[in-house]
Image (cartoon, rainbow, N blue to C red):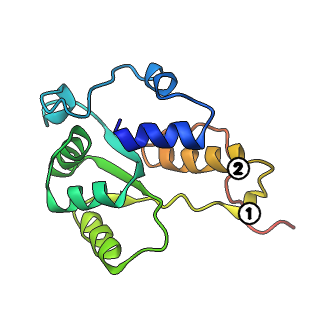
Amino acid sequence: MSRWGEATIKYETDYHPSNVKALADHCHSINDMAAPISSGSFKADGMIVVPCSMKTLASIHSGFCDDLISRTADVMLKERRRLVLVARETPLSEIHLRNMLEVTRAGAIIFPPVPAYYIRAGSVEELIDQSVGRMLDLFDLDTGDFQRWEGWAK
């Protein structure tokens, strides 16, 4: 987890980074470039970077692996594994769009966390659950706890 990822958790949620890290089976320092996940021989189905800053996206696009997040993302691309980047910057500059296009061409999936207004969410948590469910769908993981589009209501 990056320093700014930790700051985002503190600012935008009721959690502390230690609460989130406790949910993980393993947690590596962002500076541990020798962590098992930094190698293509480490078995992983893929990776979700959420939130993905434009700096991290640019690092992934250029192959400039200066931390464990960008290195592991680079591994996902070179090993042809699923890489989902949850880019939430707005508005987007031409540089952002070019970087997004190039990482998409390299095999990544850009997932802007756009609210699904059709669910008529009653809370922010419902919107988050819907986005997380859609992200996990990309890995064939069905949480079963969000509303899917079923066409216009009759």
Query: What residue is drawn where x is 16% and y is 46%?
Result: 66
Query: What residue is drawn where x is 20% and y is 33%?
Result: 31
> In the picture, residue 92 is in which quadrant?
bottom left
> In the picture, residue 62 is in which quadrant?
bottom left
List x then y, in percent, for residue 103: 26, 63
Query: What residue is drawn where x is 21% and y is 56%?
Result: 59
Q: Secondary structure at mark 2?
A: loop
Task: Tell whether 128 sits left or right of 38.
Answer: right
Q: Quadrant of the C terminus?
A: bottom right
**Cα distance, mark 2 to mark 1?**
9 Å
Residue that sits furthest to the bottom in the current view: 94
Amino acid tagged 1: Tyr
> In the picture, residue 53 is in which quadrant?
bottom left
List x then y, in percent, for residue 37: 21, 31
Query: Which residue lies under the disc numbered 1?
Result: 118
* Label 2 packing within 10 angstroms: few (<14), some (14-19), many (20+): some
Task: Tell whether 5 sits left or right of 128.
Answer: left
Q: Report the front residue among 131 and 52.
A: 52
Instruction: Give the mark nearest the N terminus, 2 or 1.
Output: 1
Using the image, determine if residue 96 lies above or below residue 3.
below
Amino acid tagged 2: Gln
Contact? badges 2 and 1 (CB < 8 Å): yes
Query: What residue is drawn where x is 67% and y is 45%?
Result: 146
* Label 1 packing within 10 angstroms: few (<14), some (14-19), many (20+): few
How many numbered callouts? 2
Query: Which residue lies under the disc numbered 2?
Result: 147
Q: Quadrant of the N terminus?
A: top left
Using the image, determine if residue 137 lies above or below residue 6.
below
